[in-house]
């Protein structure tokens, strides 16, 4: 006979998977910016790595255009290493922190060397300049289809609103989500929740009355969350 804690975990997992599926179906027709962005960067691991680096603290449509300008000039570490830092900064402007990101991109190109192979482990990715945990997990998921949950601001906020996680830091939330969802679902969490956060469960002015989860979400508000 299954223990009560196992049964409880299984119920929580089933509910979370159902909610994730419901959100995926509801968000798809809304065409959130993240869908177009992720479709645009699905190519080589190197391009995915650079696009993910550019996307930090930058809106997806801005990142998409900046990445297109940069890759039109250089789309491999070897070619990109020939560009000066100032040239990269000019090409990627106006992404957030474009000067710092230009410096990191050049350093990454030097680090990857002639082979240009992007590392395929979290630890190795984290050693690259400018690549934090969220970005590393995103690269693992998008470039190598590895099971990874990238906890950005949308995933952090929505997981807590839905009661999927209680953690105070992105790493704590990442670990809670890893325990909650079956491994084969990990890759979906970021893409589904980012699109949801861009369109419905927004940081300010969430659209709770129209939300597909309004009946099961513990944070639902009759007029949406205002702050
Ligand atoms: S009901 Fe409101 S807070 Fe809950 S998931 Fe939907 S939009 Fe977000």
Image (tube, rainbow, N blue to C red):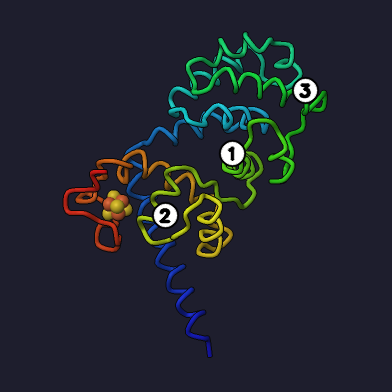
Q: Nearer the viewer, residue 184 or 118?
A: 118
Horizontal side of 200 relative to 73 (left or right) equals left
Which residue is under mark 2? 159
Label 1 near ligand 1 (CB < 8 Å): no
- The dot on residue 23 is none
Q: Earlier in the sequence, mark 1 or mark 3?
A: 3
Question: What is the crowding at mark 2: few (fewer than 14 residues within 10 Å), some, or many (at least 20)?
Answer: many
The image quadrant where one finds the C terminus is top left
| Name of the residue lying farthest toward the right | 114
Q: Earlier in the sequence, mark 3 or mark 2?
A: 3
Which residue is under mark 3? 110
| Residue in view at x 56 percent, y 30 percent | 41
Q: Is 30 placed above or below 170 here? A: above
| Residue in view at x 53 percent, y 22 percent | 97
Residue 61 x %, y %: 43, 25
* Proximity of marks 1 and 2: CB atoms separated by less than 8 Å: no
Q: Earlier in the sequence, mark 1 or mark 2?
A: 1
Horizontal side of 167 relative to 147 (left or right) equals left
| Name of the residue lying farthest toward the bottom | 1
| Residue in view at x 51 percent, y 79 percent | 6
Q: Nearer the viewer, residue 97 or 94?
A: 97
The residues tagged by marks 3 and 2 sit, at their Cα atoms, a distance apart of 37 Å
The residues tagged by marks 1 and 2 sit, at their Cα atoms, a distance apart of 18 Å
Look at the numbered disc 2 and give the secondary structure of its residue: helix
* Proximity of marks 1 and 3: CB atoms separated by less than 8 Å: no
Question: What is the crowding at mark 1: few (fewer than 14 residues within 10 Å), some, or many (at least 20)?
Answer: many
Question: What is the crowding at mark 3: few (fewer than 14 residues within 10 Å), some, or many (at least 20)?
Answer: some
């Amino acid at each position: 006979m299954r223990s009560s804690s196992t049964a409880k975990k299984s119920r929580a997992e089933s509910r979370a998977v159902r909610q994730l599926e419901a959100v995926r179906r509801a968000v798809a027709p809304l065409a959130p910016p993240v869908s177009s962005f992720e479709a645009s960067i699905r190519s080589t691991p190197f391009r995915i790595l650079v696009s993910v680096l550019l996307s930090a603290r930058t809106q997806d449509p801005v990142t998409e255009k900046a990445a297109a300008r940069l890759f039109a000039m250089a789309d491999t570490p070897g070619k990109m290493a020939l560009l000066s830092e100032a040239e990269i900064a000019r090409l990627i402007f106006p992404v957030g922190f474009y000067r710092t990101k230009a410096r990191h991109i050049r350093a990454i190109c030097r680090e990857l060397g002639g082979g240009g192979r992007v590392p395929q482990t979290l630890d190795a990715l984290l050693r690259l300049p400018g690549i934090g945990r969220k970005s590393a997990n995103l690269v693992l998921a998008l470039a190598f289809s590895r099971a990874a949950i990238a906890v950005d601001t949308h995933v952090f906020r929505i997981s807590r609103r839905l009661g999927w996680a209680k953690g105070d830091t992105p790493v704590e939330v990442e670990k809670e989500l890893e325990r909650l969802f079956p491994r084969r679902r990990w890759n979906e969490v970021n893409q589904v929740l980012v699109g949801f956060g861009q369109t419905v469960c927004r940081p300010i002015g969430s659209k709770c009355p129209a939300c597909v989860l309004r009946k099961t979400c513990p944070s639902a508000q009759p007029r949406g969350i205002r702050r």
